[in-house]
């Protein structure tokens, strides 16, 4: 009987031990599962934080882009409503341009460049010129020289022969030309056929006069009737250039028709001006030139 009781007690102890072991194993598995779940949650949290961080970063970038776009659009609107509200005319009604390096600036008889202004990035574009020697008029601003090279390449691919004739002209050079005309031909003639120093687009470094062998490289209205002149009129805007002095717009620009005179303003603005068939003055809502002249 004693042996039976001892055996039963041992069996009970084993069962109890098994239950304890099973319980311990269960608790261990639960703990492991909890740890795994926590680890998974941590990973998810980290992943969520990363995604949130990227989302916030992207939102910030988008916001910056939108703000830049809004600023750019607002700047354009400001200019279209007066070009630059900070520019004030002097007692003679002449405005000195506040930002002479802007590619969309308007230079005419009522709007002048600062005295002695020299563009900061003059280079010689890699295009064909109508003369061989070096002169300052071989230069343009770098921002316009590259597009001019592309324009010449485009013309060549179309079978058109373009030659550069006259680009940058310094304040001092324009002053010499104007004073010579005053001394030799009189003030009235000089004001009619020559721009006063500071009022010439050539000084901006954004302009190039072009011609072709068909008109002996001359700067004449007949250039428009050549294959080169026709191609230029139809495709200059694709490279960021406009025909600055269109036909029949002398009362607005202040200068007679010059189909050879192209001015760099950037592709977007050139496209708008070409499609709207307006002058630079009209696009920005600026007052027209006071009289019909030639440069």
Image (cartoon, rainbow, N blue to C red):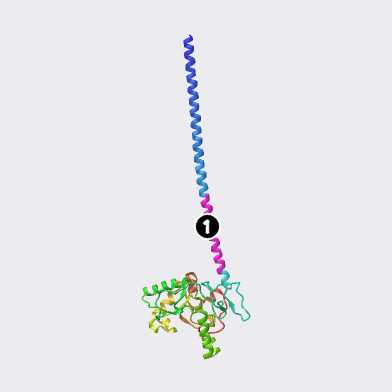
The one nearer the camera, 9 or 194, is 194
Residue 245 screen position, x and y as percent? 49, 80
Query: Which of 132/205 is in front?
Result: 132
Residue appearing at x 49%, y 22% in the figure: 17
Above or below for 223 versus 74: below
Few, some or many residues within 10 Å of mark 1 (<14, 14–19, 20+)? few
Residue 20, image x, y percentages: 50, 24
Residue 204 can be seen, yes or no: yes
Apparent side of residue 184 relative to residue 149 in the rendered image (left or right): right
Magenta-colored stretch includes residue 178: no
Q: Residue furthest top?
A: 1
Magenta span contains residue 71:
yes
- In percent of width and height, residue 178 lies at 52, 85
Question: What span is in magenta?
Answer: 52-76
Magenta stretch, overall SS: helix
| x then y, percent, for residue 80 | 56, 72
Task: Using the rendered image of the protein, determine whether residue 249 is visible from the camera's viewpoint.
Answer: no
Instruction: From the image, tell me which residue sits under label 1.
Output: 61
What residue do we see at 49% from left, 40% from top?
Answer: 40
Residue drawn at 51 percent across, 84 percent down: 176
Q: Nearer the viewer, residue 122 or 278?
A: 122
Assign a secondary structure to mark 1: helix
Left/right placement of residue 151 relative to residue 281 reads: left
Q: Is the residue 50 above or below the residue 225 in the image? A: above
Q: How many marks?
A: 1
């Amino acid at each position: 009987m004693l042996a039976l009781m001892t055996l039963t007690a041992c069996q009970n102890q084993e069962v109890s031990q098994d239950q304890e072991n099973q319980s311990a194993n269960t608790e261990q598995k639960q703990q492991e599962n909890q740890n795994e779940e926590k680890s998974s949650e941590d990973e998810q949290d980290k992943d969520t934080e990363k995604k949130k961080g990227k989302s916030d970063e992207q939102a910030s970038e988008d916001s910056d882009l939108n703000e830049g776009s809004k600023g750019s659009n607002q700047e354009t609107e400001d200019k279209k409503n007066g070009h630059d509200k900070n520019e004030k005319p002097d007692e003679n009604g002449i405005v000195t341009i506040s930002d002479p390096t802007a590619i969309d600036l308007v230079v005419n008889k009522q709007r002048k460049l600062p005295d002695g202004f020299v563009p900061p990035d003059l280079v010689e574009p890699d295009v064909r010129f109508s003369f061989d020697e070096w002169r300052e008029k071989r230069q343009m601003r770098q921002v316009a020289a590259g597009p001019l090279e592309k324009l010449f390449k485009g013309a060549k691919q179309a079978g058109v022969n373009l030659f550069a004739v006259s680009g940058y002209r310094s304040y001092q050079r324009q002053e010499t030309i104007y004073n010579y005309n005053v001394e030799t031909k009189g003030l009235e003639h000089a004001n009619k056929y020559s721009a006063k120093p500071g009022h010439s687009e050539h000084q901006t470094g954004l302009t190039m006069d072009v011609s072709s062998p068909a008109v002996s490289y001359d700067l004449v209205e007949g250039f428009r009737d050549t294959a080169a002149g026709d191609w230029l009129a139809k495709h200059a805007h694709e490279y960021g250039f406009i025909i600055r002095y269109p036909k029949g717009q002398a009362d607005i620009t202040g200068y007679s028709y010059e189909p050879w005179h192209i001015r760099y303003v950037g592709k977007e603005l050139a496209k708008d001006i070409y499609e709207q068939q307006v002058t630079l003055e009209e696009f920005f809502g600026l007052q027209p030139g006071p009289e019909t002249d030639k440069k």
